[in-house]
Amino acid sequence: MNAPWVDLRSDTVTRPSAAMRAAMMAAPLGDDVFGDDPTVNALQADVAARLGFEAALFVPTGTQSNLCALMSHCQRGDEYLVGQMAHCYRWEGGGAAVLGSIQPQALTQQPDGSLSLADIEAAIKPDDAHFARTRLLCLENTIGGQVLSADYMVAASALALRHGLARHLDGARLFNAAAAQAGDVLANARAICANFDSVSVCFSKGLGAPAGSVLCGSADLIARARRWRKVAGGGMRQTGLLAAAAQYALDHHLERLRQDHALAHQLAQGLQGLQGLRVELPHTNIVFVDVAPERGAALQAHLKAAGILITGLYRLRFVTHLDVDAAGIDRTIAALRQFFR
């Protein structure tokens, strides 16, 4: 197999472009733990301003960003409401419980990735010593590649406020959610963020930076989060190298997310009608394909032999990103069709 790999495992596999690498090498640096890395400071101020928050904090990973948010909103014995399939509950090592003594109340998600408003309201505990104190509602957008509707976010936010809950958004793919709507991507992202007290945004997925997330919120919340970042080992030094990559992504890679969405639709459409698999039409850049459990391993091996990487065994996940082009999608469709023939 001489052609380059088509890596559809995740949008985290992207490599920095030549222009992004140049921006990293040119970045002025300082010591971020002392607060004097100018590139980090500029990124934090820029992201906060663009998304409508008072302050922001650059952290190494989305997992740490969510953890710092949860521990800044909640204290020991508090509780956050979250979806069963939400990343900050299911795939982040139980950090809030392990490190923060914060209880998750995981709710079953609806087919569109949302939490039923009735389920949220029913899960809020009364002020009673028998119960953990319900303090925070956590949503995720996109969730499994699906976009939460604007009306839903407004309604969920209003419900939380009526009950005195803070609101956090895991917006690891916030800009994918924004790019799935018509109009300016940044304006759409800011409108989503208006429903939340804190938002975590990842730069190492579809935006193509090598690492880094930014947590946005009030000045007081970010001051608390900065302390928790240190406790969690996230105080890096000359991290302007990474912040410069995130800044480049913010300045150059927002609108192009729609290309990833188009390629995901191209893939899904190209697999329609194949016997032996079921394809979900994507909202954004993630395509899920269901196959019989006994065929999943063989299919993955067949694709790998063709130079195509995916994840999953019976529920397969294909993720498009800036290092995947139309030719790679055509190769993937052809390989899948060959397997199911």
Image (cartoon, rainbow, N blue to C red):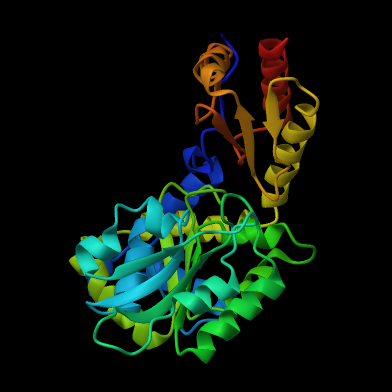
Residue 212 horizontal side relative to residue 322, left or right: left
- The answer to whether 331 is drawn above or below residue 108 in the figure is above
- The answer to whether 4 is drawn above or below residue 85 in the figure is above
Which quarter shows the C terminus? top right
Q: Residue at x 59, y 23 (%)?
A: 292
Residue 274 horizontal side relative to residue 243, left or right: right
Question: Toward the viewer: 99 or 228?
Answer: 99
Question: Toward the viewer: 126 or 18?
Answer: 126
Q: Is residue 212 visible?
A: no
Residue 245 horizontal side relative to residue 173, left or right: left
Task: Tell me residue 317's x, y (percent).
Answer: 57, 35
Q: Residue at x 66, y 12 (%)?
A: 339
Q: Residue at x 60, y 15 (%)?
A: 3
Task: Tell me residue 122's x, y (percent).
Answer: 49, 77
Q: Is residue 156 visible?
A: yes
Task: Tell me residue 36's x, y (percent).
Answer: 29, 73
Task: Tell me residue 208's x, y (percent).
Answer: 53, 47
**Quarter of the image where one finds residue 97:** bottom left
Question: Toward the viewer: 189 or 336?
Answer: 336
**Quarter of the image where one finds residue 228:** bottom left
Count of marks placed on residues: 0
Which quarter shows the N terminus? top right
- The answer to whether 275 is drawn above or below residue 191 in the figure is above
Q: Residue at x 47, y 45 (%)?
A: 21
Question: Toward the viewer: 304 or 325?
Answer: 304
